[in-house]
Image (tube, rainbow, N blue to C red):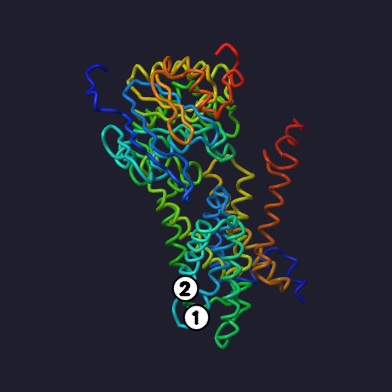
Amino acid sequence: MESINYQNFRIDAENICVDYNGKVALYDANLRLKPGQICGLVGMNGAGKTTFFNALTGFVNISKGKIRINGESVRSAQKDQTIAYVPQNEGIDSQFPISVWDVVMMGRYGSMNIFRCPRESDVQAVKDAIERVDLTDHLSTPIGNLSGGQRKRTFLARAIAQRASILLLDEPFSGVDIRTEKLISELFIQFKNEGKTILLSTHDMIHVREFCDLVLLINKTVVAYGETSEVFTPENITTTFGGISPDFLFGPES
Amino acid sequence: MELCSFLTIDSFIRDPLTHDFMRKALLMSSLVAAVCGFLSSYLTLKGWALMGDAVSHSVMPGVVVAYALGLPFSLGAFIFGVGSVALIGFIKQKSRVKEDTVIGLVFTGFFALGIVLVSKIKSNIDLHSILFGSPLGISLSDVKQTIIISLLVVILLSIFRKDLMLYCFDPRHAKTVGINVFFLHYLLLTCLSLAAVVGLQSVGIILVVAMLITPGATAYLLTDKFDNMTVIAVLSAIISSLIGIYISFWFDLETGGSIVLAQTFIFLFAFLFAPRYGIFKLKKLFAGYK
């Protein structure tokens, strides 16, 4: 990790603004992440967490500022399959007639030909990814028949199959069983060792302390950003959540 | 006197085939049904039923203008179909009116414009066949157009089959891995407009939306695999067309309405008896006998 040039950030977002038809969703937001870093994105509902993700993936256009992914534009990051997005369980149609295998294969679409015919290597990548999330017994199970945790793992497998170096995870721990939670935390350690960069949004403050090297507190703009041990203070959290005391949010021991 | 013909299934099926117009109607309606059925898988999963209704009604003035100017009716229909969607998007973005309201008011506006235009240039246009379809009276030039458009839609859908499935399922992921979501959105809209154009010959403008959603809805109740859903949708659409046309021939009923009714009955059957998702879950019933 030391050999990496300090200027070569995986994610470098500078003063970005996003507005939807004149309504500001995010302004003057900055974020810099290096390979192997895990950063927690914390904020209220509507604070701009999803908007931040959308800006990084290019799903929405930024009205101001600059985003560099590995020193390049978002467009070329898309072409290079650099970023994988793992949606919230609520963000997907669980009744869609599609199997675990097909979902994970979608992680390979970006690097396939126009007909999306899987090559030997794609099949192997999908197999490996499904094995890593422990869903080999459910290859052809429709996603509608999976538990919340299994579905979450399916989408994680898609990100693994994509071989992305940046993972964006929207509420990875919400609505999952203990087994899945354990598996996800193990995967995070592996991802970190592989030098992947992870940005995850979460409501659970304990997870932030447990996994995140860095934390980005936002409320339409950056409230605080830095090492979790320094920045994740009751004062900052209170500011982020609009004056509500962190005691109220996650117990007095914080 | 026709009752005698009912005595054998053989003559029930064969007699209509002795008429040239019936052979043509059966063939063309099956083709149109297949195209609309193929597309219906995507529309039902994407939640575009209302959009399908909007586009199919909005093509009306296009058809009228094209007839009046002597242009291929598909061209006019296509322009107004896509135009209505663009207008819906524009009004939605620039006003605070909710989307379903905008869709409703735009397509009825277009449809009304079509009706007014027909009344102005009524000489060579048969309003009844536009509104209710006329599969039995389809002309040779219409046959050619229908075949060309149908092939085009089938080819486009086949090439982008998987991308469109991804677009319906998770557009954000599609965008993230560099797939052109903007293109897929308009591709699906284009196919919708074109399918509405060919569909309206069979069942007319008012009912064409049924061709675009009912087979997909039926198939959705019967399978958990996308590819199977497409196949079932296409087959159920074709079968409904054939049933509808036969029934309308023997009982002297409106053909378009008969086709759509056949689709509705097949849907109801799936709704009640689908193995997994039906009300009576046939699988469980059979399991009880073992």
Q: Is residue A241 above or below residue A2?
A: below
Percent position of residue A10, x then y: 31, 29
Assign a secondary structure to mark 1.
Answer: helix
CA–CA distance in space, label 1 to label 2: 9 Å
Residue at the disc numbered 2:
B76
User: In front: B41, or B237?
Assistant: B41
Provide the chain ID for the residue under circle 2. B
Figure quadrant of the N terminus of chain A: top left
- Number of dots carrying numbers: 2
User: In front: A75, or A240?
Assistant: A240
> Residue A76, labelled with which disc?
none
Assign a secondary structure to mark 2.
Answer: helix
State the residue lying farthest toward the top: A253
Hey, what amino acid is under mark 2? Gly
Residue at 69 percent of width and 57 percent of height: B264
Provide the chain ID for the residue under circle 1. B
Residue at the disc numbered 1:
B67
Q: Quadrant of residue B246?
A: bottom right
Q: Quick one: label 1, few (<14), some, or many (20+) residues within 10 Å?
A: some
Hey, what amino acid is under mark 1? Tyr
Percent position of residue B54, x then y: 57, 63
Residue at 46 percent of width and 48 percent of height: B164
Q: Quick one: label 2, few (<14), some, or many (20+) residues within 10 Å?
A: many
Percent position of residue B84, x then y: 51, 65
Percent position of residue B180, x then y: 38, 48
Q: Quadrant of residue B21?
A: bottom right
